[in-house]
Image: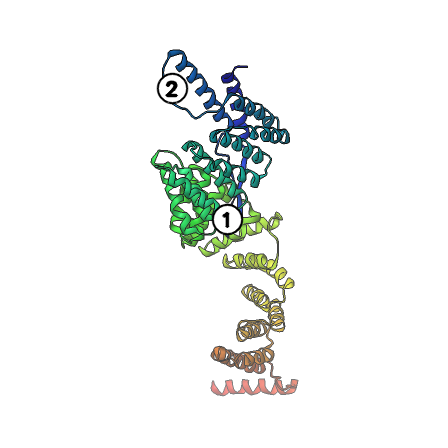
Amino acid sequence: MKPLKFLVCRTSLLMKLLNRDHIVRTASANSTRKNWLLPALTVFLSVVLVSTASAQVKRKEDKESGRKTKETVAMSQPVYEALTEIQALVEAEQYSEALAEIKKVQQKKKLSPYESAQIWNLTAYTYYLMENYKGAIGAYEQVLSQPDLPEALQQSTLKTLAQLQFTIEEFQKALEIINRLIAMLDEPAADVYMLKGQAYFQMGKFSDALDPIKIAVQMYRDQGKVPNENWLLLLRVIYWEMKDFPNMLIVLEELVEEYPKDSYVLTLAGVYSELGDTKKQLALTEALYDAGYIDGKTHAVNLANLYLLHGIPYKAAAILQKEIDAGNVEPDVRNLRLLSQAWYQARNDRKSIPPLVQAAAMSEDGELYMRLAQSYLNLEMWGEAAEAAKKGLAVGKLKRKDTANIMYGMALFNQRKLEQARRIFQEAGKDNRSKRAAGQWIKYVDSEIVRRDTLEQKLPDVKPRDVDEILRANADAVDDAG
């Protein structure tokens, strides 16, 4: 097979191998690490062989034409053929055999620095495919140790070496290699700046990471390109870590526009919350929920709280009731109390009672019983109100025991249990905060006790004869008047 035709075939296969992804850790909003996929950056042997074959053809043409040839970086035919055979072993994933053949080539005498560099290059690539990253790093360092290497080879090797340092989480070493690369370049590419930013990011140096990442993103924008989604995500995380929510908002808006996903819209809603713009937060969250992009299991409670915050209690109650009934939201004390509160604020006391009864039974919290007592009072269910208030006082953990006693006294009063109510109001009056209200209630109770006692007084018995005498006396008085 002729060299160039052979190389075209090999190049396409090698490109497929090189598209394997590396895992690079990135941080989330709560500073936990996530994985990013970063593709391999260099094509090794295919470029070398193409360059060598081209140089051989060029020298042959120059020789036939009689032109003087300028010294070109290339390799000898025996080394070229040996590396071609080793490449076939690598493509067949026969890595041990490939490494054994590489050692044989390395033993050849009078290898040029360029040939040695390419042998180490192929060695590194083989280790890389074997996921022996430390071995690959050592081999690439051997590449760079060769004298008089072409700049393009130095730059591609430094770039790959930096990425391998990311793979083994040696971020400081990766940063040092990237800085070496940047020093060699007149105009570093955007992805080089991104590597620098990622190195700082992985070390938790967010302010140092910000500038190179912003430069990379802006370079793409200046070229009329849309910045890579992962770049924008990294920038978003940095702004989150720095609590720079206004700039985080700008990045999220670009993500929503260029890479529309419901998760970005939801995060955008969260940023509006951080900025105090809960109206926009509610609008976005409601739209996502109504469209079915977010599920009730995760977001119903948050949406209900937003409705309550903006004075829309009926919607809060309706969404919670729906999701609890569907089994998506757990009917625990917290959620049942929220549901009851929503119905109560929506002025639907009857619907506020069942979830509150459940919540109170599940929790030793006197406040829940007092809320239940209030709902019963609103419905004029005096017996139930008194029972709930009594239970609340017995359980305790009340913010205002005096207020609880006032409510208990009111429930007793409306059952006409006046003496009991008076004692409870007296208990409430021991707290200065309720002293005045309790005193007014006691006066009212006392007046009702007097009125009740007056109405209940027994009139003296009157005999029939006495009645007749009274009637006659009245009749005589009428006659005399006439």
* Residue 464 placement, left or right of 185: right
The residue that appears at 41% across and 33% down in the rendered structure is: 151
Q: Position of residue 279 (x, y in %)?
A: 41, 51
Element type at mark 2: loop
Q: Nearer the viewer, residue 175 or 471?
A: 175
Residue type at the position of mark 2:
Thr
The disc labelled 1 sits on which kind of residue?
Ser
- Name the residue at 36% across, 17% down: 68
* Above/below status of 236 relative to 64: below
* Colour logic: rainbow
The answer to which of 223 and 424 lies nearer the viewer is: 223
Q: Of callouts 1 and 2, which one flags the residue occurring earlier in the amino acid sequence?
A: 1
Q: Position of residue 399 (x, y in %)?
A: 53, 71
Quadrant of the image containing the N terminus = top right
Mark 1 neighbour class, 10 Å CA radius: few under 14, some 14 to 19, many 20 or more = some
Nearer to us in this view, 166 or 108: 108
Residue 190 is situated, as x and y percent measured from the top left of the image, at 39, 38
Q: Which mark is residue 82?
A: none
Q: Residue furthest top?
A: 64
Q: Nearer the viewer, mark 1 or mark 2?
A: 2
Q: Count the marks: how many? A: 2
Q: Nearer the viewer, residue 245 or 360?
A: 245
Mark on residue 69? 2
The residue at which mark 1 appears reads as 28
Q: CA distance from mark 1 to mark 2?
A: 57 Å
Q: Residue at x 38, y 44 (%)?
A: 214
Q: Label 2: how many residues lie within 10 Å, few (<14), some (14-19) or many (20+)?
A: few
Picture coordinates of residue 201, whole percent (x, y)? 46, 48
In the image, residue 49 above or below residue 298: above
Image-based side of 256 in relation to 292, left or right: left
Q: Residue at x 39, y 36 (%)?
A: 189
